[in-house]
Amino acid sequence: MIYVLTPEINSLVHGWKAYAYEFQPLQLLVGKPFPDGRPEGMLGDLLAKNMDRKPGDTLEIQETSLTGASVYHGVSGHEAGVVVLMPPSFRPSPLNRKHGGVAA
């Protein structure tokens, strides 16, 4: 899903369970991994830099406030610009008309 994070920045948002295989290529740069069920997210390093965010900062996604748990580096530009959330910390709707999110 693509969501509007700020008026200038859109991002894909993934929901992965803790220790999912998708985490294997990611390198944790700062912060901590997070347990299932907490309202926290991980930011790719490119996205964190563009949004000037670090662990502990609040991130608003679709009127839901989340705490940034960590910043990671991915092996691709796609991974570096994504927010990773732990279900059920965030349950986005398929289409967010109010804030411009679209299904991808």
Image: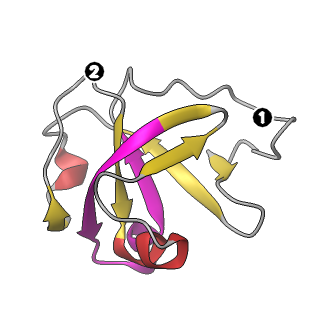
Q: Which mark is residue 6?
A: none
Q: On the rendered image, what quadrant is the N terminus found in?
A: top right
Q: Which quadrant of the structure image shows residue 71?
A: bottom left
Queried whether the magenta region covers residue 67, the answer comes back as yes
70 horizontally vs 65: left or right: left
- In the image, what residue occupies the spot 65% across and 51% down? 2
Residue 75: image location, x then y, percent: 28, 77
Q: Which quadrant of the structure image shows residue 6?
A: bottom right
Residue 20: image location, x then y, percent: 19, 40
Queried whether the magenta region covers residue 74, the answer comes back as yes
Asked if disc 2 and disc 1 are in contact, CB closer than 8 Å, the reply is: no
Residue 57: image location, x then y, percent: 39, 53
Residue range highlighted in magenta: 66-85
Q: Is residue 26 visible?
A: yes
- In the image, what residue occupies the spot 37% across and 60% down? 43
**Amino acid on which disc 2 is placed:** Gly
67 horizontally vs 51: left or right: left
For marks 2 and 1, the one nearer the N-term is: 2
Q: Residues within 10 Å of mark 2 (few under 14, many from 20)?
A: some
Q: Which mark is residue 96?
A: 1
Which of these two is toward me, 41 or 1? 41
Q: Measured along the vertical axis of the image, is residue 89 above or below residue 29?
A: above
Which of these two is toward me, 5 or 12? 5
Q: Which mark is residue 37?
A: 2
Q: Measured along the vertical axis of the image, is residue 64 above or below residue 21?
A: above
63 horizontally vs 39: left or right: right
- In the image, what residue occupies the spot 67% across and 49% down? 3
Residue projecting furthest to the front: 57
Coloring applied to the structure = secondary structure
